[in-house]
Amino acid sequence: MSRVSVIVAIAAFLFTAHREPTTRPSAGAASQRASPAKVRIIFLHHSTGMCIWEGGVAEWFDAFNRGAATQYEIVERAFPAESPYGWNNYPFDYWNLWVRHAGERPFKGEPTLEMLAKDFDVVVFKHCFPVSAIEPNTGTPDIQSDDKRIENYQLQYNALRQKLRAFPKTKFIVWTGAALLESETDNASALRAKTFFDWVRTSWDVRGDNIFLWDFRALETDGGLYLKPDASSGDAHPNPAFSRRVAPLFCGRIVDVVTGRGDGSPLIGRLLSPQVAKVDDSSHSKPIPADPSRSERPVPQGDGDSASVQWIVDDAEREDRLSSRWEAGVRYVPASSGHVIRLDFSKAREADWGEYGKQRIISTRRPAKNEDISSFERIGFRVRCDRSMELVITLITRSDAISRDAPSYFGFSGYVQAAPGDWQSVVLNLSAMELGMEGDRAYEAEGKPMRPMRLSEIQIVTNKKNEHAIVAMDDIVFSRSTSLSGNKAVR
């Protein structure tokens, strides 16, 4: 994979586009282009999906359409119905309904893809939580088997992917599978479920086609094996509070797919503000001070290390860090309370990202030995700027196990669409980030981690057109707790 595969996943307070195409547009397929204002969407689900729907999906789209002047029409349907097909919506059943019995006529009362694609621009579908009750493989995979085994699931998913791609004018959003409570499964089965849906995220889902994911499982488990008890209604169904919290993320994910951002915005979704959803990158939505660094902001107490609850990477209060922590493009400037980090992208390193244009890159210096961040759960920081712009935050690993001069590296990245005005707080769940590599040597040498584990450098990237923007950051902190919650955060 090339450097342009360095990927996503930050959600932030009032950040209007986790990945705006003006900075790094979606990969080349026609299915990735922005759709027209009127879009027909159908959500196929059973009971877990209904919990999220009742968390406010229809109401969210009503409000969004009013604020953004769009016509996104979304409907829901129990699929397949209990009769005559039966209340099953697992990988076998979607394969059975849409691949095995494809055509212009319904099968057991259920619409085929040929029928759905005629009526809808976006089709969203999911599995019920028993999909995670996965049994061991037998060594003889069978695409026609309804046994819940990884070997069968993979055959069925691969056939589904080929079928979905046969409808390039329709976009498909697949939920990662709902999880079970720890009391309702066993460790081996839960590990198999995680293994399969990790495969769905990292191998089955590819860029540039018309298929996208919503990582519901990550939201339910917070990167673990089981449905979190505080998200449960007492069984494996999500409770109303959790449903209300994640429904806007689901809606935001749909809008990102509709508007051509599906391959770049976070798989868990992001919060969207309908009032600014259609504002161009270069627009300034409200007055700003001459220098955003001159504003009150909290100052963290003390400093930390990798053994503490928090590790303060940089709070701008120790000027001796400037020469040792950062490469070009950073200076500390006084604010009304202490100092903040001023990013000067005009002095930063430049890189050509091909079709995504030239970028400016500010990075921390590589330490003598990688920092161990495996025990931390989140990274948080504050940002303030003078315009709507995108910042790409990438946690880079250059393996200590290979030559320091080796070109191979990998990173976990997120895209932040910062709005002008007041300080905004960003919190990133490290387990929700996605992977991109420059070659695979470093990744293999580090044991193929699924989240940031050993940190070589932090990169902050923006498009060259923003090189003269006034940008300030502060309080870049890794945390093991929820203490980085800030103003708004989405996990």
Image (tube, rainbow, N blue to C red):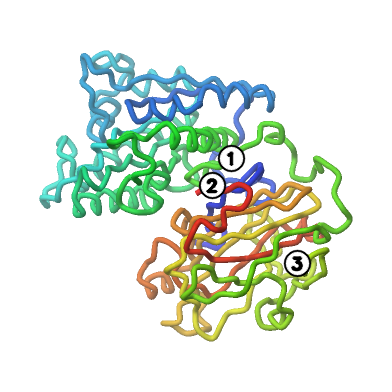
Q: Name the element at disc 1.
A: loop
Give the labeled residue for mark 2: 490
Of callouts 1 and 2, the N-terminal one: 1
Vertical placement of 113 versus 135: above or below? above
Vertical placement of 111 versus 183: above or below? above
Question: What residue sits 54% from the left and 55% below the top?
Answer: 428
Question: What residue sits 62% from the left and 67% below the top?
Answer: 459
Q: Residues within 10 Å of mark 3 (few under 14, many from 20)?
A: many
Vertical placement of 222 versus 118: above or below? below
Of callouts 3 and 1, the N-terminal one: 1
The mark lying in front, picked from 3 and 1, is: 3
Instruction: Find residue 271 and name its label.
Output: 1
Question: Taking 90 as reference, is 489 left or right?
Answer: right
Vertical placement of 270 versus 482: above or below? above
Check if mark 1's residue and mark 2's residue have beta carbons within 8 Å.
yes
Looking at the rendered structure, the kind of residue marked 2 is Val
Looking at the rendered structure, the kind of residue marked 3 is Val
How many discs mark residues in the rendered view? 3
Of callouts 3 and 2, the N-terminal one: 3
Q: Residues within 10 Å of mark 1 (few under 14, many from 20)?
A: many
Gap between marks 1 and 2, in whole Å? Answer: 8 Å
The location of residue 470, given as percent across then percent down, is 81, 59
Give the labeled residue for mark 3: 340
Q: Nearer the viewer, residue 106 or 348?
A: 348
Quarter of the image for residue 302 reads bottom right
Question: Taking 135 as reference, is 420 left or right?
Answer: right
The location of residue 34, given as percent across then percent down, is 61, 34
Looking at the rendered structure, the kind of residue marked 1 is Leu
Instruction: Find residue 336 and name its label.
Output: none
